[in-house]
Amino acid sequence: MLVVGGVGALIDSVAFGSLKYAFGTLFIGACVLVAVRVHTDDLIGVVIMPPLVYALITIGVGYLDPSTGDGSSGLRNKAIDIGSEMILHAPILLAAFLLVALIAVFRGRRAQIARRERQRALAAQSGAERRRRPGH
């Protein structure tokens, strides 16, 4: 997520001077890909990752490529630039988070059902073996 989102942020910073299409597309795509491919035991971590990665990328963009563009490097201006990057591109984070959460819920529920079915099959198999043993 961080690498792909960072590449999108770099492309947009060079092409447009702020975060736009490449960042949104690549960040959301990376989040969805990770949510689809991660092991089911790690789904909770994947749901937590998009806001953290988004914060790192927007802090980096706000610090390195300020949207105010006035060239001043005061702490207050840096904080304003970072805050504006985070706020202006929040729909990207919201879309990524909602998609990842939906995928995680779906995959987690599906894994839970599969686990129950395996347990039922094992219980039925062991019950059948006990009945086949002589002396029972």
Image (spheres, grey):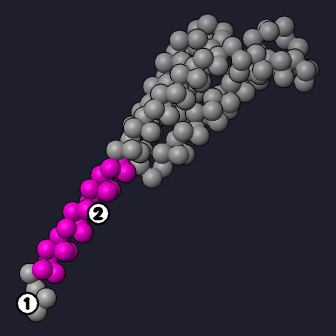
- Residue kind at label 2, given as amino acid type: Gln
The percent coordinates of residue 135 (x first, y second) are: 10, 92
Side of 96 where 106 appears, left or right? left
As for residue 75 lying within the magenta part, the answer is no
Give the magenta part as a residue range.
Answer: 111-131
- Residue kind at label 1, given as amino acid type: Pro
Determine the residue positioned at 52% across, 41% down. 46
The percent coordinates of residue 91 (x first, y second) are: 60, 17
- Answer above or below: position of 9 versus 107: above
Query: 48 or 27: nearer the eye?
Result: 48
Determine the residue positioned at 32% across, 56% down. 115
Query: 51 or 65: nearer the eye?
Result: 51
User: What is the number of the mark on residue 18?
Assistant: none
Q: Element type at marker 2?
A: helix
Q: Which residue is mark 2?
A: 119
Quarter of the picture containing the C terminus is bottom left
- Based on the displayed image, in which of its 4 quarters is residue 107 positioned? top left
- Answer above or below: position of 133 versus 16: below
Main SS, magenta region, reads: helix
Query: 62 or 11: nearer the eye?
Result: 62
Between disc 2 and disc 1, whose residue precedes?
A: 2
As for residue 112 lying within the magenta part, the answer is yes
Determine the residue positioned at 84% across, 7% down. 70
Side of 54 where 43 appears, left or right? left
Side of 42 where 59 appears, left or right? right
Q: Which residue is mark 1?
A: 134
User: Residue 90: in sight, yes or no?
Assistant: yes
